[in-house]
Image (cartoon, grey):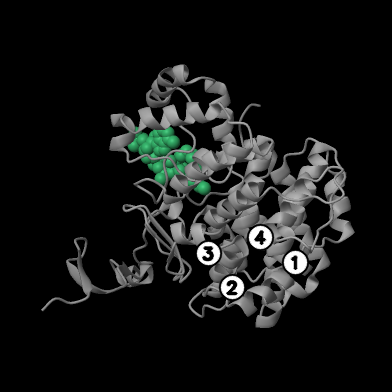
Amino acid sequence: MSRNSLTVIDNRTGTSYELPIEQGTVKAMDLRRIKVDEGDFGLMSYDPGLTNTAAAKSAITYIDGDQGILRYRGYPIEQLAAHSTYLETAYLVIFGELPTPGQLAKWERSVGRHTMLHTNIQHLIETFRYNAHPMSVFISATASLSTLYPDARNIADPANRILQVERMVAKAATIAAFTYRHNQGWPCNFPDDGLTFIGNFLKMMFRMTEVHYQPNPVLERALNILFILHADHEQNCGTNAMRVIGSSQADPYSALAGAAAALYGPLHGAANEAVLRMLEQIGTPANVPAFLKRVKSGEGERLMGFGHRVYKNYDPRCRIIKRTAEEVFQVTARNPLLDVALELERIALQDDYFISRKLYPNVDFYSGLIYRAMNLPASMFTVMFAVPRTVGWVAHWLELVADPEQKISRPRQIYTGAEPRECRPAGLRGGTN
Ligand code: ACO
């Protein structure tokens, strides 16, 4: 009869061990039983980048990277993009169920109320140089929220946690908008509770002198879709950072800033910015083959917006964003760089280099073109990612804090340094220089 376990034989000692298998995993701590003698520390696993290590049990997001499937709380991302709004999806990701009309109205009111930003944070944003990278400003401003809300350190109180969550979801948008306005040298627009969350965000970003700013419904819908698609993606680098910092019971604003810092790297959330710069550098579809030749030779940069640690198939978010880009271009000018992107995708998907490595376009490949169509500078793109990803970060933080199996995050290492040696006073260390 088959048993749900793994039998391993340690060939150093000939001893056999049976390790239980639960949910397709063996417990790393079970490996520690495997020792050559009693004084031995026991076996560890070595996994740089945690490529094959589950660090949490999570009920939030499901990804099947081989099939190209993404679901939040069981709902396919395609259906959420088609039938829900960003705040509805945010509620789902954070609380586990789609809201009833009453729950949604209450949630929208609570988040709407918290979009107001303390003037200290506005002043902080304004102290940065006009050309400071918006992600650096966003990270600093979100970290600074902990100075205004010391109550956030009381993470043991569930009601208090939800209050901080509402603040973070709301204020991420306002911080992003104020950061953009400062970057452009324009005065900030204060939140308008008479608009939807996304409508208000557009107004805070783009209102110039209009007395009654009305968000363009096509752009409002497009931004809803983009924000839904970016809301969560299970244990990615930024979310892992949120969990690692949260595991020390630091306040959630500090953890949020750390998660945003992780997102800032070009291998993660700043890939959208890198994609646009890459498309600009390529210039026209005719230059695509030469560019891809350089990518494949390893001499040039990677094909940004391609490849994914988890997806070994077409990223389902990318398909929706590509469609949304076409809709946005109906109301804005069509960006000619779209043709460069389409040509890159067409050739790469027929090329053995990309096929054999299962490299497909990811979420960042087309999103920048939409943001550029909205007249945003490339440096703002990662901030546009961080605003909705705040939802995923706070959902994982809530899950972590309530999970009795979680501990302070503290990996092991394989020490490769010097053997013990004696430290002598400077004059006795030898050497001529
Ligand atoms: N262009 C060219 N070659 C690539 C690319 C790419 N974009 N991505 C991976 N490869 C190649 C690697 O060179 C490697 O080839 P090799 O086996 O001959 O050495 C192979 O594919 C495997 O690549 P890894 O780096 O081992 O894959 P990993 O899972 O560690 O990296 C990552 C995933 C970081 C996303 C990678 O594909 C990449 O750098 N992509 C470009 C940046 C990007 O778009 N990032 C956004 C990801 S989505 C997000 O974070 C929101």
3D distance between C-alphas at marks 1 and 2: 21 Å
Which label lies toward us, 3 or 2? Answer: 2
Relative to residue 267, is residue 146 depicted above or below?
A: below
Report the residue marked by disc 3: 410
3D distance between C-alphas at marks 3 and 2: 20 Å
Q: Nearer the viewer, residue 28 or 214?
A: 214
Relative to residue 311, is residue 377 depicted above or below?
A: above
Question: Of callouts 3 and 1, which one flags the residue occurring earlier in the amino acid sequence?
Answer: 1
Q: Which amino acid does label 1 sit on?
A: Gly
Question: Of callouts 2 and 4, which one flags the residue occurring earlier in the amino acid sequence?
Answer: 4
Q: What residue type is labelled 3?
A: Arg
Question: Of callouts 1 and 2, which one flags the residue occurring earlier in the amino acid sequence?
Answer: 1
Q: Which amino acid does label 2 sit on?
A: Leu
Question: Of callouts 1 and 4, which one flags the residue occurring earlier in the amino acid sequence?
Answer: 1
3D distance between C-alphas at marks 1 and 4: 20 Å
Q: Say few, some or many: other residues with alpha carbon within 10 Å of mark 2 (under 14 / 14 to 19 / 20 or more).
A: many
Q: Tell me the quadrant of ligand 1.
A: top left
Which label lies toward us, 1 or 4? Answer: 1
Which label lies toward us, 3 or 1? Answer: 1
Q: Say few, some or many: other residues with alpha carbon within 10 Å of mark 3 (under 14 / 14 to 19 / 20 or more).
A: few
Report the residue marked by disc 2: 398
Report the residue marked by disc 1: 112
User: Disc 1 beta carbon < 8 A from ligand 1?
Assistant: no
Tell me the element at label 1: helix
3D distance between C-alphas at marks 2 and 4: 12 Å
Q: Which mark is residue 256?
A: 4
User: Which quadrant would the C terminus be assigned to in this image?
Assistant: top right
Tell me the element at label 3: loop
Residue at 30%, 36% (x, y): give it. 355
Residue at 62%, 50% (x, y): give it. 223
Q: Do the residues labelled 3 and 1 touch (CB within 8 Å)?
A: no
